[in-house]
C-alpha cells in the first residue's frame, strides 16, 4: 500500500509540474484534466472517497471545458483584432 | 518590475519557504495523539449524536456548517462575477447568433447517436439526485451531486446543439434556483432561532439511522447546496458557451 | 516506514507550491497564470490529505462493516477539501472571465504587456 501511495504522490508531482511549466495553450485542457484524475486517484488511496468524487466530477468535466471555451474565445478575439489591425494599416497606407 | 528582479525575488522567497517548511515538518500523528482529539471526537459523535453514517458530510453540513455557508457564498459570488464580466463584454440584443463551434461539425451527429446521448440524460439526472440526497449515508452530498446535475445539461448541448440548450437553460428558473439555493442554506440555519437555538443548530428530528430521512437539517442543507451548485455551474457553462457565438454575417 | 510516507508527501506539497508559483512568475499568457494558480491550490490538497491520513485506518464512513465510532481517517480536513474542490472551479472560471475581459480591452494576454494603467 505504501509503495502505491508514494508512486501516486510522484505522479501528482509530475502532473503538477506539467501543468505549471507547459507553455502551449491549446494542450492545457487535456493536461489539467489528467492532473485532476491523478489528484482524485490520490484522494482515493489516502481514504478520502468524498473528495475523490468531487475531484472526479470537477476535474473531468467542469474545469477543462471552461478552459477550452475560454481559449476558443481568446483565439477568436485574437483573429478579430488582427483583422482590425490589418484593415487599419491598410487605410493608413492609402 | 523587470523579469530578472522578479525571478530573484521568487528564488529568495522560495528558499525561505523551504527552510521554514523543513523546520516545521513532523511525521503524521497517530490515532491516540493529542493533536488528534478533535477528529476523534467527531468520529465518535457522528453516529451517536446525529444518526448518520458519513462523518465528512456531518462536518460539512452540521458540525462546521458555518464554514460551509462561507464557502457557498464564495461560489455564489464568483459565479455572479463571471456572469457580470462575460455579459459586459458585448451587447448582443436583437442579433441572430450562430454557434461558432458548429462549422467544425460539418456533419452533425447522426440520429442514432443523438438518441443515445439524449437517453443518457435521465440516468445522469437520477444519479445526480441520488448523490445529492444520499450525502449523509454514503460518500457524496450537495457539492458533488450538483456538478453531476450540471453535466446532465451539458449532455443536452452535445446531443442537440446550442439552440436547444439555450432554449431549455435560459429559462429564468435557472437563476432563481441559483439564488434560492444560497438563500435556502441561510434560511435553514435561521430555522433554529424559532426553537431559541443558535444559528445552524440541527433542530429537526434526526430520523432513523441508515435511512434517507436521517440527519435532520443536514439532508435539507445538502439539497439546497446541490441546487445552488448545479444552477451555478449551468449558468457558468452557458455564459462561456455564449461567448463562442458569433453574429451571422449578412450575405 | 510511515514517517517516510509523510515526509514524501510534505516534499510533494512544497514542490507543487513552488512550481506553481514559478509558473505564475514565468507565465507568458494569462491562461497559464490561472492554471499555475490551480497547481498552488492543489499543494494544499496534498498537505491536508497527509495531515488527515492515519496509516491503516479506513475512511470515516460507517456503513456496514465499520462499527460506528471506531477509529478512522480525520474527517475534518476532508470536509475542508471537499468544498474547496468545487469552489475552486468557479473561482478559476471567474479568473478566466477576467482574462477574456483583459484580452478584449488590452489587446494582449501577456501579463507583461498588459498596461492598462498607462492609458
Image (cartoon, rainbow, N blue to C red):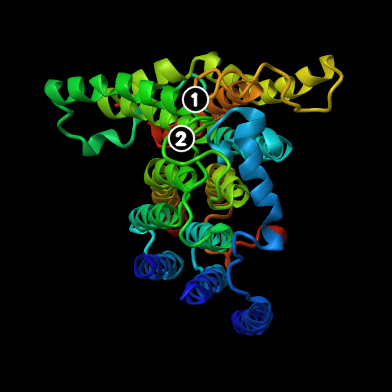
Marks 1 and 2 in Cβ contact (< 8 Å): yes
* Residue B199 coordinates in the image, percent (x, y): 80, 28
* Residue A93 coordinates in the image, percent (x, y): 43, 59
Marks 1 and 2 on same chain? no
Q: Secondary structure at mark 2?
A: loop
Question: Quadrant location of residue A82?
Answer: bottom left
Q: Which quadrant, please, contains the C terminus of chain B?
A: top left
Report crowding for label 2: few under 14, some 14 to 19, many 20 or more residues within 10 A (C-alpha).
some
Q: Residue at x 57, y 70 (%)?
A: C21
Q: Which quadrant, please, contains the N terminus of chain B?
A: bottom right
Question: Which of B64 and C87 lies nearest the eye of the viewer?
Answer: B64
Identify residue for label 1. B210
* Residue B173 coordinates in the image, percent (x, y): 54, 14
Q: Secondary structure at mark 1?
A: loop
| In the image, farthest residue toward the right | B196
Instruction: Relative to B6, say whether B158 is above or below.
Output: above
Q: Residue at x 61, y 66 (%)?
A: B29
Q: Is residue C74 visible?
A: yes
Host chain of mark 2: C
Q: Residue at x 36, y 58 (%)?
A: A31
Q: Residue at x 66, y 43 (%)?
A: B42
Host chain of mark 1: B
Dot label at residue C63:
2
Q: Is residue B182 left or right of residue B112?
A: right
Report crowding for label 1: few under 14, some 14 to 19, many 20 or more residues within 10 A (C-alpha).
some
Question: Which of B104 and B46 lies nearest the eye of the viewer?
Answer: B46
Question: Quadrant location of residue B152?
Answer: top left
Instruction: Relative to B100, say whether B28 is above or below.
Output: below
Amino acid at each position: 500500500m505504501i509503495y502505491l501511495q508514494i508512486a501516486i504522490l510522484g505522479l501528482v508531482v509530475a502532473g503538477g509540474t506539467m501543468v505549471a511549466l507547459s507553455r502551449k495553450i491549446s494542450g492545457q485542457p487535456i493536461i489539467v484534466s489528467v492532473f485532476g484524475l491523478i489528484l482524485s486517484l490520490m484522494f482515493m488511496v489516502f481514504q478520502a472517497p468524498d473528495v475523490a468524487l468531487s475531484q472526479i466530477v470537477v476535474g473531468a468535466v467542469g474545469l477543462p471545458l471552461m478552459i477550452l471555451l475560454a481559449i476558443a474565445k481568446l483565439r477568436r478575439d485574437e483573429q478579430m483584432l488582427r483583422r482590425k489591425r490589418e484593415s487599419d494599416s491598410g487605410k493608413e497606407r492609402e | 518590475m523587470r523579469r530578472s528582479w522578479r525571478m530573484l525575488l521568487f528564488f529568495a522567497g522560495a528558499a525561505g519557504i523551504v527552510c521554514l517548511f523543513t523546520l516545521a515538518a513532523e511525521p503524521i500523528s497517530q490515532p491516540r495523539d493529542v493533536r488528534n482529539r478533535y477528529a476523534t471526537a467527531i468520529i465518535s459523535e457522528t453516529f451517536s449524536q446525529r444518526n448518520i453514517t458519513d462523518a465528512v458530510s456531518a462536518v460539512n453540513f452540521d458540525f462546521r456548517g458555518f464554514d460551509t455557508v462561507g464557502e457557498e457564498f464564495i461560489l455564489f459570488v464568483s459565479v455572479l462575477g463571471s456572469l457580470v464580466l462575460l455579459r459586459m463584454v458585448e451587447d448582443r440584443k436583437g442579433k441572430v447568433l450562430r454557434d461558432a463551434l458548429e462549422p467544425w461539425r460539418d456533419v452533425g451527429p447522426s440520429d442514432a447517436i443523438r438518441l443515445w446521448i439524449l437517453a443518457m440524460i435521465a440516468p445522469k439526472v437520477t444519479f445526480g439526485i441520488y448523490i445529492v440526497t444520499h450525502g449523509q449515508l454514503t460518500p457524496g452530498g450537495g457539492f458533488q451531486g450538483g456538478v453531476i446535475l450540471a453535466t446532465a445539461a451539458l449532455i443536452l448541448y452535445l446531443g442537440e446543439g446550442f439552440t436547444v440548450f439555450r432554449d431549455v437553460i435560459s429559462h429564468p428558473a435557472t437563476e432563481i434556483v441559483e439564488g434560492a439555493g444560497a438563500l435556502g442554506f441561510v434560511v435553514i440555519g435561521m430555522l433554529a432561532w424559532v426553537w431559541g437555538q443558535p444559528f445552524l443548530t440541527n433542530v429537526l428530528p434526526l430520523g432513523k439511522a441508515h435511512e434517507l430521512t436521517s440527519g435532520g437539517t443536514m439532508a435539507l442543507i445538502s439539497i439546497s447546496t446541490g441546487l445552488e451548485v448545479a444552477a451555478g455551474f449551468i449558468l457558468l457553462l452557458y455564459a462561456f458557451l455564449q461567448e463562442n457565438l458569433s453574429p451571422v454575417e449578412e450575405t | 516506514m510511515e514517517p517516510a510516507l509523510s515526509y514524501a508527501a510534505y516534499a510533494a506539497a512544497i514542490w507543487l507550491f513552488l512550481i506553481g508559483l514559478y509558473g505564475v512568475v514565468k507565465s507568458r499568457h494569462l491562461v497559464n497564470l490561472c492554471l499555475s494558480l490551480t497547481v498552488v491550490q492543489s499543494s494544499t490538497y496534498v498537505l491536508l490529505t497527509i495531515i488527515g491520513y492515519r496509516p491503516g485506518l479506513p475512511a470515516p464512513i460507517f456503513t456496514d462493516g465499520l462499527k460506528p465510532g471506531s477509529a478512522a481517517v480525520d474527517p475534518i480536513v476532508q470536509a475542508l477539501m471537499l468544498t474547496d474542490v468545487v469552489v475552486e472551479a468557479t473561482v478559476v472560471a471567474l479568473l478566466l472571465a477576467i482574462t477574456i475581459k483583459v484580452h478584449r480591452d488590452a489587446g494582449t494576454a501577456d501579463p507583461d504587456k498588459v498596461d492598462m494603467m498607462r492609458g
